[in-house]
Amino acid sequence: MKLRKFMKASVLLFSFFIIGLSNSFAQVKEPVKFKMEIENLENSIYELIFEAEIDDMWHLYGQYFDLGGPRPLYFDFDENENFKLIDSVVELSEVIHEFDDVFEVNVAYFAKQAKFVQKIEVLTDEAFNITGEISGQACYDDGACISIGDDILFKINGGVELNTKEKTDAKTPVIVTENKFTNKMEDTSSLLGFFFLSFLFGIIGILTPCVFPMIPMTVSFFMNKSEKRSKGIIKALIFGLSITLLYALVGLIVSVTSAGANFTTVLSTHWIPNLVFFVLFVVFAASLFGLFEIVLPSGLANKADAQVDKGGMLAAFFMALTTVIVSFSCTGPIIGALLVKAASGKVLEPLIGMLGFGLGFALPFTFLALVPGMMNKLPKSGGWLNSVKVIMGFVILAFSLKYFSNIDQNYHLGVLSRDLYLVIWIVIFIMMGIYLLGKIKFSHDSELKHVGFFRLLLAMVSFIFAIYLVPGLFGANLTPIAGLLPPKTSQKFDLTQKSATKESASYYCESPDYADVLHMAYNVNGYFDYEQAFECAQSQNLPVLLYFTGHS
């Protein structure tokens, strides 16, 4: 009974996870954290100490390097008659110097951590604050950069005559603040989050009609009474490890073949891979709905099964291979969806994703082989297994729109607006809720005599999510899932849209070219044509800010 509840809870957890899934697309990265301290040296002389913690694979540019490159770090202190600066900010950490091929200048930056000190003299005995601003630039090793900036705040209790020896005993006030840069960069694929998502998909894969009925037969393979129990345990561990490595091998192949510098850019922007992914997701959804089955050649399963009959430790590996091949008709669409999502992200995502999926898929088999007594508590096979497949079909069908939207947005076709996209999603999740209530049946579904508690709860989750999407039809941001939706510029009907655009148009020298298909972020005044922008800037004697971005 406990195991049955666990399996139903896994499906419930998956549904809740889908609602929050897009948070992994919308998560932001805070690559640099500053800790600030103030220390009294002697009498009225203080040191303002800035200690920066820099995330792995990120670097923070320093203060001093050639002009014409990235933005240098700058500490700007507000003028105040209560103190004065002594010299400039000193860099105490090891500085890395190198030639930047992009900017073609010598640059200096810090990795892992950095420490900066500004010496000041306090001119009053009264308490006051030192304020200012930090600005600079941090970059990821793959070349993605963000501008950083935050406020500086130190609280000074006033000048106190202390010598170096006495300063600790006198408990000179040390103000420690944790400041995080507020300019954040979107990290559209957290490897750890994707690993756990894939792991969850692996567990869900067990609860499909192609796999679940195989559990008793597979576990019995490790319960040979003529063999020692220890030998059966070793076989079970080899079996689980083999399944994990087989799926990881698939991910490794995808990772290696997609390691080109521009590979992910092409996948996310070019119409051919996005169209292929869209069609694949629709095909996977149709397969999960029961329209047809995606199977590997039967000869592969027969050859692998023949090796199992030979026995021995190697048989555990071939048993794992047979399980992977035979289960492909149900797990294939799930694996395909994970690989498509992974291939359009970071290079390591396919490997990480398949490793997580394989581990989640192998764990129940291995656990039951180690504790065969739990077999008696497994729920019986039935129509609920097909329901798991159908739920997955609805979810994958919804995600397929993301790839069609990429084509529509990148090539400015105007076919799939944000509100139409949301309407389709609302219909999909309403239909999913109706299905869970037993009002819609597919070809492989069995008769549903009554709706259980967990099924009702899943239906409620589906309806709640559909209703949550409704405000988006009128322009609501829907921030948690914004990474999965078309931009608001494609919204046909937006009650939240401000009228500032028409007012700001008067600042242009002339209407910008290509404004009918291209849009500036945050409705900033700007031009899409280089020559037109410079002509306007020269006529008004204004500087030019070049914003480098892609067509998409």
Image: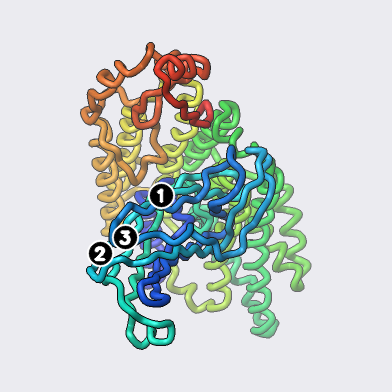
Residue 333 visible in the shown view = no
Q: Secondary structure at mark 2?
A: strand
Q: Amino acid at mark 3?
A: Ile
The residue under the point 42% across, 23% down is 542
The crowd level at tag 3 (other Cα within 10 Å; few <14, some 14-19, many 20+) is some
Task: Report the amino acid beneath label 1.
Answer: Gly
Q: Quadrant of residue 221?
A: bottom right
Q: Which residue is mark 3?
A: 130
For marks 1 and 2, the one nearer the N-term is 2
Q: CA distance from mark 1 to mark 3?
A: 17 Å
Relative depth, front residue between 47 and 54: 47
Quadrant where the N terminus is found in the figure: bottom left
Q: Residue at x 55, y 31 (%)?
A: 269
Task: Name the residue that disc number 1 marks.
Answer: 149
Callout 2 amino acid: Phe
**Residue that numbered label 2 is attached to:** 128
Of pointers 1 and 3, the one earlier in the residue sequence: 3
How far across and down, in percent of the image, does residue 112 sit? 56, 62
> Which percent across, then down, holds residue 352?
59, 56
Instruction: Tell whether 354 sits left or right of 512.
Output: right
